[in-house]
Image: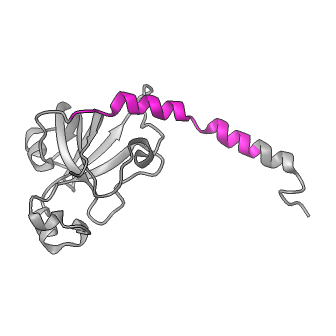
Amino acid sequence: MNTPLRHPWLALLVAAGLLAAHPCSAADADTARKQFVLAEEPPGSLTPTAAKERLDATPQQVVVAGRIGARGMEPFLEGKASFVLVEIPADDHAKKPGHDADNCPFCKKKTANAPMVAVQFLGPDGKPIPIDARKLFGLAKGVDVVVRGTGVFDAKLALPIIQLTADGIHVRRAP
């Protein structure tokens, strides 16, 4: 019988290999936070709808204010500094505790044609930072953020999605 307990050295080698293969440490996360987290909200933020009207296939600097969400889908990519933004509902009913815009017929109707914003944070190697955005920035679904970066919008895509490579994030805190 060959169980993991029979060969404890094998379990140690596997664990050491997994740890060595994981490129991010606490120091990497702290460095990324210092690089990307903005103490103050950047000026000139646009809604995703307004940003869509301004952007095209040529990368441009933009500041977008949105709410983390993805219309019934998971807004985060597991293990990546990436998430999806949707419009922040302007109605008072959306500010009530426990409101879920994904399941609210009024919010769904108002945002049916609004674009989503796919946000990603890249490391020095040009690849997405391999730290989950929830851990890296303390984010959760339903949190309002303002993101600054380079955005593009391709009207030829089947879904209206702005692609935003971020260089800064400000998390709006509830009053």
Between 162 and 65, the residue placed more toward the observer is: 65
**Side of 129 where 87 appears, left or right:** left
Q: Position of residue 29 (x, y in %)?
A: 47, 35
Question: Between 33 and 128, which is closer to the camera in this rendering?
Answer: 33
The percent coordinates of residue 151 (x first, y second) are 21, 37
| Residue 26 vs residue 162, the one in the foreground | 26
Q: Which residues are magenta?
A: 14-40
Residue 58 can be seen in this image:
no
Percent across and percent down for residue 2 are 89, 60
The residue lying at 17 percent from left, 53 percent from top is: 115
- Inspect this view and state whether residue 15 appears: yes
Report the colour scheme.
one colour
User: Which secondary structure dominates the residues rendered in magenta?
Assistant: helix
Give left or right: position of 55 versus 72: left
Please determine whether, in this image, residue 93 is positioned above or below residue 42.
below
Residue 165, image x, y percentages:
29, 36
Describe residue 48's horizontal placement relative to residue 72 as left or right. left
The quadrant in which residue 128 appears is: top left
Name the foreground residue: 146 vs 109. 146
In the rendered image, the vertical position of residue 152 relative to residue 27, given as above or below: below
Residue at 85%, 50% in the rendered image: 8
